[in-house]
Structures are given as structure tokens and as C-alpha cells.
């Protein structure tokens, strides 16, 4: 389980505000259309001005309660939905940062209900494949180093040391995580 609920607050808050605004705008348009249709219907012609005002006030109060309930419900649902999406994005960004540093392999841990599991699996598979190839290259370099060492005494030591230093430099470029 993650320690922070808002791992990328700028994205999560932006989409939460977008969701709230979308609900509010939809609610306002729905209210305006509904009251306009009601007030221009033949039903209202048979009511007094006081009854029309009372009806409009009741419709407004009921509509505001409904809008508030929908707003709260969708806000809570959006927070959880965005958390299940943004959390994995944050985890994938961290893994990619490690890969940029040459730290390959390992696994990406996502929760059961998180989104983007397929992408995480592909990135994990890619990192493990790179790690495998690097391990193969390391093995080959070690084999070459052994062969070069066997040439000591037959070839100038300075040349052998230079080649071995180059091989050691190549080996230090990558780190494999388990």
C-alpha cells in the first residue's frame, strides 16, 4: 500500500477540478433547461404567482440537494479512480528514472486494483531483457579478460593492462537490480 494518497497532486487536483466543473456546468444547464421548460408549460398557467414561486423554490432546493449529492459522489469516486491511475504512473516514472541510471531488472509492484498493469508489465519485461543482455555481455567480457590474462608474458603488460582497464570501465556502466 502506498504511503501517500496524492503522489502527483498537481495532476490529481487538476483532474478533480475538471470533474467538479464538468458536473457543475452540466448541473447548471440542466437546471436552466428544466426550469425554463416547466415555467413555459401549460401546467403553470393554472397556478397563481405565489404557487409558481413556491414550486420554483422547491424545485431549486431539490435540484441543489441532488447536485450536491452527485458532486460529492463523483468527487470521491474521481479521487479513488485518479489515485489508481496516477499511483502507477508515479511508480513507472521512478522505474524509468532508475533505468536511465543504468539500474535494470527488478519488478514493478502495483496494487491489485491499479490501472496500467499491462504497461508496467511491458516496462518490467523490457528492463529484465536488458538486464539479461547485459549479464551476457558481462560474462563475455569476463571470458575475454581471462583470455587476455593468459597472454601475459607473451604480449607487453602495458597493452594488457590498458585493455583490462577498458573492459573494467565497460562493466561499471551498468548495475542490475534484483
Image (spheres, rainbow, N blue to C red):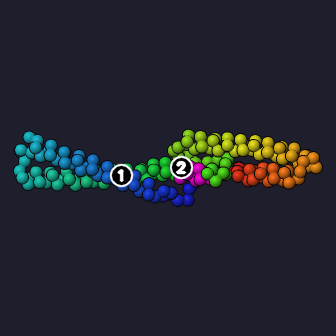
The residue labelled by disc 2 is 88
Q: Which residue is drawn at 81% across and 53% down?
A: 162
Q: Residue 119 or 37: which is nearer the viewer? A: 119
The residue labelled by disc 1 is 18
N-terminal of the two: label 1 or label 2? 1
Of the 4 image quadrants, the one containing the N terminus is bottom right
Q: Residue at x 19, y 51 (%)?
A: 59
Magenta segment, prevailing SS (helix, strand or loop) = helix
Q: Residue at x 79, y 45 (%)?
A: 141
Q: Position of residue 153 (x, y in %)?
A: 94, 49
Task: Residue lying at the far front in this picture: please name it.
Answer: 156
Q: Which residue is drawn at 67% across and 48% down?
A: 104
Q: Give the range drawn in magenta.
A: 89-98
What separation in Å lies between label 1 and label 2 (alpha carbons)? 21 Å
Q: Where is residue 140 in the image (x, y as percent from the top left)?
A: 79, 42
Q: Is residue 175 magenta?
A: no
Classify mark 1: helix, strand or loop: helix
Q: Quadrant of residue 133?
A: top right
Amino acid at each position: 500500500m502506498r504511503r501517500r494518497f496524492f503522489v502527483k497532486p498537481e495532476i490529481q487536483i487538476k483532474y478533480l477540478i475538471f470533474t467538479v466543473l464538468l458536473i457543475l456546468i452540466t448541473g447548471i444547464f440542466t437546471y436552466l433547461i428544466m426550469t425554463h421548460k416547466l415555467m413555459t408549460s401549460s401546467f403553470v398557467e393554472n397556478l397563481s404567482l405565489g404557487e409558481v414561486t413556491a414550486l420554483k423554490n422547491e424545485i431549486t432546493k431539490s435540484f441543489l440537494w441532488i447536485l450536491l449529492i452527485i458532486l460529492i459522489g463523483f468527487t470521491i469516486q474521481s479521487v479513488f479512480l485518479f489515485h489508481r491511475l496516477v499511483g502507477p504512473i508515479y511508480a513507472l516514472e521512478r522505474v524509468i528514472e532508475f533505468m536511465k541510471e543504468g539500474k535494470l531488472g527488478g519488478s514493478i509492484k502495483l496494487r491489485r486494483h491499479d490501472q496500467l498493469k499491462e504497461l508496467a508489465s511491458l516496462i518490467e519485461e523490457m528492463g529484465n531483457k536488458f538486464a539479461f543482455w547485459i549479464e551476457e555481455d558481462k560474462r563475455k567480457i569476463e571470458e575475454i579478460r581471462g583470455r587476455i590474462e593468459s597472454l601475459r608474458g607473451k604480449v607487453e603488460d602495458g597493452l594488457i593492462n590498458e585493455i583490462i582497464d577498458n573492459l573494467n570501465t565497460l562493466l561499471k556502466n551498468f548495475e542490475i537490480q534484483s
